[in-house]
Image (cartoon, rainbow, N blue to C red):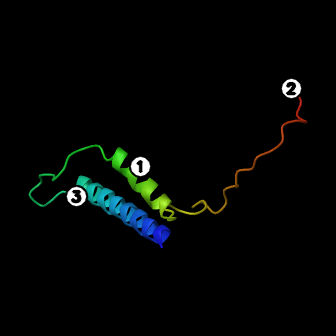
Amino acid sequence: MEEDKESRVETIVKVSILLWSATLLTLSYWEPPDGKKIVDFDPTFIASIFSASTASLGLSIGKKGNSNGNAKTPTIGNNKDTKK
């Protein structure tokens, strides 16, 4: 029972941080019709918090795979037998 409460609190905190960072990111890019920005800052740090909070919730933001259909998939090779 105690572990369930901790899990709920943890999830509430993660979702709260996600909503907070999403709100700040939205406000940093949104410009009302009067031309005055609501907030004016570099959103890089907030974007990293947003990405980390989505990852902690198990969400993945971004494209899966490569958009170019004929691109080769990167491979890791063994360079032990190559000549110098």
Q: Which residue is mark 1?
A: 48
CA gap, disc 3 and disc 1: 19 Å
3 vs 1, front mark: 1
2 or 3: tag closer to the N-terminus: 3
Q: Residue at x 40, y 61 (%)?
A: 14
CA gap, disc 2 and disc 3: 55 Å
3 or 1: tag closer to the N-terminus: 3
Amino acid type of the residue that numbered disc 3 sits on in the rendered structure = Trp
Residue 30's tag is 3
10 Å neighbourhood of mark 3: few (<14), some, or many (≥20)? Answer: some
- Image quarter for residue 29? bottom left
- Image quarter for residue 73? bottom right
Left or right relative to 36: residue 65:
right
Residue 3 position (above or below residue 44): below
10 Å neighbourhood of mark 1: few (<14), some, or many (≥20)? Answer: few
The residue positioned farthest toward the left in the image shown:
34
- Image quarter for residue 24? bottom left
Residue 75's tag is none
The picture places residue 65, in percent across and down from the top left corner, at 61, 61
The residue positioned farthest toward the front in the image shown:
2
Left or right relative to 61: residue 17:
left
1 or 2: tag closer to the N-terminus: 1
Question: For numbered disc 2, what is the local secondary structure?
Answer: loop
Amino acid type of the residue that numbered disc 2 sits on in the rendered structure = Lys
31 or 13: which is nearer to us? 13
2 vs 3, front mark: 3
Q: Which residue is mark 2?
A: 84
Residue 83 position (above or below residue 12): above
Left or right relative to 72: residue 21:
left
